[in-house]
Image: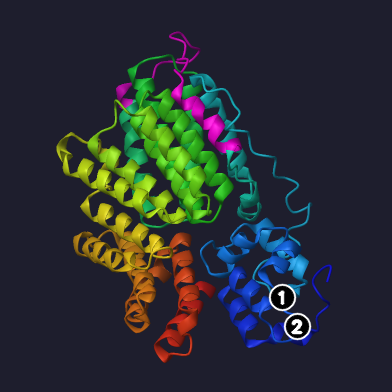
Amino acid sequence: MGGPPQLSAAFWDHPALAEAFADQDMGALLAAYRHHPHHVHRITQDRLAAWLGISQAQLSRYENGQNPIERMDRLRHFAEVLGVPPEKLWFDRTGPSRQDDGDAAAPPDVLGAPWDAPNVARSVEETTRSDLAISRRAALTGAAAVAVGPALVEPMQRWLSPLQPLSRWASGSAISEDELAALQRVAAGLRGWSLRGSAGLARKAVLGQLNELADRLRRAPAGSTTDRAFFVGAELAKIAATMSWDAGMHQAAQRYYVLAVRMAKAGRNDPFAACCLAAMARQMFDLGRPEDGLDLVQLGQYGTRRSASPTLRALLFTREAWAYAQMGRVAEFHRAVGMAQECFAARDPAAEPTWLDNFDEAEMAGVIGARMRDLARHDPRQAGLAAQHIRRALALRHPSKVRNRAFDVIGLGRTLVVVGEPEEACRLVRGVLPTAAKLHSGRVLRKLQDFARETGRYRQEAPVRETRDAIRTVLSA
């Protein structure tokens, strides 16, 4: 058989396929397609993988939910190869027309641009101007263009080189202390806005402020307030990146993480640049690229080997452990976690920078617990430890950290599914659904989608079926 068979319309109405469509889960769709009783000949993973142009191992990870398929180009390609009827899909199989996106110019190349301070400011100004003009739908279709592998890691190695500073004499006036204080107040307000899970308008507010600051920095002479203003810009760029990631706009998120690293470098704040590299690594983990994420973390570790505070070192070790968890490297995972705990125990909170305030004891426990849950896919013995850490995070987490608590609860529910307690898992997750609906957080919704997929094997149990239906209602809203 040279390719997928011709199929009748009734083929796509099979209950297993209908469930995959309802869950918006391409991995489950591939598995249901392969096991469909209609096929005259058995469809092996090797055969289906060959039709799709991927490896058997990659298909296996898709089918068991280890690597969720979120890239739009991949979703469209798989649907086209298999001949899935467009009306069955939860996405547009053909994509927007060229006329729809004709007014959207290609965003600037932030990876290949020079890293001297004036060009950093220019890159930020051009990128924000471009992104303020582009539609959200056009931005979402750019997810396929995220840089990975050497195309990402090699340009980021340039952050290790000394940065050419701004000219001491420039066309604009120096940034004053009062102006800097006003910028810092605006950044603090926007940071709080982003933590509440706001979208759309809040992101545009961050980009607008970042655009104005970049225009000011491009003409500012060298000086201490200019350096500190670059750091404020790095904070704003990181906020814009996180908001973009939360909305599923991975290409835009990557651009702003890169700009955050470059602005922190221009502001002579290598530790914050390393923190931004760690955030970039999290995006790579989310995209199923643990090797790339590990490379970025190690760049951050090497660049701050003499300047990182204990808390930053702990944070970087947890990101290193994250990579090992996804790769199933149990011994390396526990070594990195042990180093993170050792560094965290040595910290002096009063001496740490304020931008690390969110990485507290609760966050540390939550991150370790969630990563142990990832590791449990390779070693089920880790699931019990994962639950202990996540429960500790919930006990320590301040009630005001609503989104983090939602992540904790969903993460604990997913862990309980691994250890065979789906009813308790569903009870927990049902309790967080009203909060999730109000947060408007794309990442929280995607975690709920993960929970729904992972409980699929228990779908015949009433509490599971009811919870999956309730999740579907929240997702559709």
Q: Is residue 168 magenta?
A: yes
Confirm whether residue 295 shows in the render: yes
Q: Position of residue 91 (x, y in %)?
A: 66, 67
The verdict on residue 454 being magenta is no
Amino acid at pointer 2: His
Magenta span:
150-178
At x 50%, y 36%, the residue is 258
Q: Which sits in the foreground, 104 or 268?
A: 268
Q: Can you tell which mark lies on residue 43?
A: 1
- Vertical position of residue 223 compared to residue 407: above or below: above
Residue at (25% x, 48% y) in the render? 338
Q: Is residue 177 left or right of residue 157?
A: left
Which residue is at the front of the view, 443 or 293?
A: 293
Q: Are marks 2 and 1 in contact (CB under 8 Å)?
A: yes
How dense is the environment of label 2, judged by Cα within 10 Å: few (below 14), some, or many (20 and up)? few
Q: Is residue 92 visible?
A: no
Which label belongs to residue 39? 2
Question: In the orientation shown, which residue stands out farthest toward the top?
Answer: 169
Q: How many marks do you count on the picture?
A: 2
Q: How is the image coloured?
A: rainbow
Label 2: which secondary element: loop
- Distance Cα–Cα, label 2 vs label 1: 8 Å
Q: Residues within 10 Å of mark 1 (few under 14, many from 20)?
A: some
Front-most of residues 169 and 395? 395
Which residue sits at x=67%, y=87%?
14
Q: Where does the image place residue 184, in percent across and percent down from the top left? A: 33, 35
Query: Residue 366, percent across and down?
Result: 29, 58
Residue in the image at 83% along x and 77% along y: 6
- Quadrant location of the N terminus in the rendered image: bottom right
